């Protein structure tokens, strides 16, 4: 596609040409859902599943689970989640900060990574 034929969806539902449309454009919700799924899948779920297969799912020590790292990386599971939330945007960062401020809700190692 050429740049002249690129269509953008504006927040009011109209379509505009990419070269003449407004600078602030909302993407269709499906694109954002795919982006969220990709980020969470690659950065959080895949490493968490690998960590679970290699060391098992904890029955009572979730703090150790969020504090452990894979042998291929020095990032802990909690840090992976924090980085994914950061990449997803400010709303997700605020959600992570809110969880990080509640060590009574999440394990301490996850709260440290999110704060």
Image (cartoon, rainbow, N blue to C red):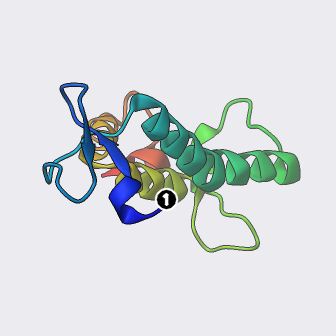
In depth, the one of 73 and 59 nearer the eye is: 73
- Tell me where residue 37 sits by quadrant: top right
Q: Residue at x 64, y 46 (%)?
A: 41
User: Please, which residue is most extreme toward the right here?
Assistant: 53
- Using a 10 Å C-alpha cutoff, classify the residue at mark 1 as few (fewer than 14 neighbours), some (14 to 19) or many (20 or more): many
Q: Identify whether 69 is placed above or below 63.
A: below
In depth, the one of 60 and 45 nearer the eye is: 45
In the visual, does 112 lie left or right of 23?
right
Q: Residue at x 31, y 44 (%)?
A: 8
In depth, the one of 48 and 22 nearer the eye is: 22
Residue 48 in view (yes/no): yes
Q: Residue at x 66, y 63 (%)?
A: 69
Residue 112 in view (yes/no): no
Residue 21: horizontal and vertical position, in percent?
17, 49
SS at circle 1: helix
Q: Identify whether 13 is placed above or below 97.
A: above
In the visual, does 8 lie left or right of 76?
left
Q: Identify whether 31 is placed above or below 46.
A: above
The number of numbered badges drawn on the structure is 1
Q: Where does label 1 land, which residue?
A: 79
In the visual, does 63 lie left or right of 90?
right
Q: Residue at x 74, y 74 (%)?
A: 72
Residue 23: horizontal and vertical position, in percent?
14, 54
Residue 1: horizontal and vertical position, in percent?
50, 60
Q: Identify whether 16 is placed above or below 4.
A: above
């Amino acid at each position: 596609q050429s740049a002249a034929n690129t269509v953008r969806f504006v927040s009011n539902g109209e379509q505009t040409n990419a070269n003449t449309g407004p600078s602030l454009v909302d993407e269709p919700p499906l694109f954002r859902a795919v982006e969220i799924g990709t980020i969470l899948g690659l950065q959080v779920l895949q490493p968490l599943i690998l960590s679970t297969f290699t060391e098992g799912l904890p029955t009572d020590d979730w703090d150790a689970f969020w504090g452990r790292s894979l042998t291929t990386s020095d990032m802990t599971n909690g840090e992976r989640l924090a980085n994914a939330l950061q990449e997803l945007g400010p709303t997700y960062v605020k959600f992570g900060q809110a969880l990080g401020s509640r060590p009574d809700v999440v394990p301490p190692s996850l709260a440290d990574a999110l704060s």
